Image: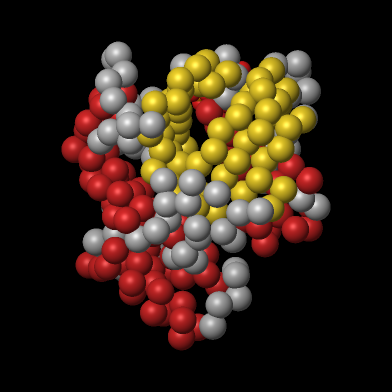
Amino acid sequence: MIEFKNVTKSYPNGVHALNRISLQIEDGEFIYIIGPTGSGKSTIIKILNGEEVPDSGLVIVDSVDVGSLKHRKVPKYRRNIGCVFQDYRLLPTLTVQENIAFALEVLGLPKKMIRKRVQEVLELVDLKEKARAYPDELSGGQQQRVTIGRAIANRPKILIADEPTGNLDPEKSREIIALLEKINAMGTTVVMVTHDIVLVNEFKKRTITLDQGFVVKDSKKGGYVSV
Ligand SMILES: Nc1ncnc2c1ncn2[C@@H]1O[C@H](COP(=O)(O)OP(=O)(O)OP(=O)(O)O)[C@@H](O)[C@H]1O
């Protein structure tokens, strides 16, 4: 479970990015975080993946108090969190399968297990035929599918996606949501930041709306959000 209790975060320039945020996300949920630019969406993601620490309040992820994690413990904590961003961040000199394998090699998994996982992931993201292609030989949607595959190769409990469809057309965006839904159905909690209200309305899920660092709406069943 993910729990934010009265979390406040400001940056050194004095911006109050989050103001007394409280929310709970249960294991296995798929939620959207939406809100205008600068409302604090990415700050929530950065706190979740240990990149930023709150000024006050508590952030608990699977019983780990993330705000007081020692620096040296952050990498181990992050193993349970897969991250996907708008800009795919693939290594350009590695093929699709090498990009996925690399994420597991740095974790020290045995070679045989890596080979097996890479095959499973390629199948899941439907890119077996592109295993030996380089990122610049792929479409944006395909690159994002590789990124998602890489993020879940280590079977993290939580997948966080910051604007994963930001650079994609509507059709490719739908494919990405379908993939995220498949991963969610396998038991992974999915937290997705998005600006894409059309998508939020089409694939209805619990939707948390931020504005100026406050949670202004938490709609459990998703539902219509004005475009
Ligand atoms: N490293 C930083 N240093 C200073 N201010 C920051 C930093 N990161 C974010 N901010 C500020 O904190 C506020 C919240 O930013 P955040 O990136 O969380 O918003 P966001 O909702 O994700 O925005 P966007 O939709 O534009 O990505 C903004 O006012 C932003 O300018």
Task: Please report the residue visible at 77 percent of the width from the left and 30 percent of the height from the top.
Answer: 56
- Residue 145 at x, y = what percent? 33, 53
Residue 149 in view in this figure: yes
Q: How is the image coloured?
A: secondary structure
Which one is in front, 12 or 206? 206
Q: Is residue 166 above or below residue 74?
A: above
Which one is in front, 96 or 4? 4
Furthest residue to the bottom? 112
- Residue 15 at x, y = what percent? 70, 16
- Residue 192 at x, y = what percent? 43, 38
Q: Is residue 35 above or below residue 96?
A: above
Q: Is residue 100 left or right of residue 183?
A: right
**Figure quadrant, ligand 1:** top right
- Residue 21 at x, y = what percent? 62, 26
Q: Is residue 93 above or below residue 21?
A: below
Q: Quadrant of residue 215?
A: top right
Q: Is residue 200 above or below residue 125?
A: above
Task: Please report the residue visible at 25 percent of the width from the left and 47 percent of the height from the top.
Answer: 178
Task: Please report the residue visible at 39 percent of the width from the left and 26 percent of the height from the top.
Answer: 219
Task: Please report the residue visible at 35 percent of the width from the left and 67 percent of the height from the top.
Answer: 121
Q: Is residue 23 left or right of residue 184?
A: right
- Indicate the quadrant containing the C terminus: top left, top right, bottom left or bottom right: top left
Residue 137 in view in this figure: no
Which one is in front, 209 or 135? 209
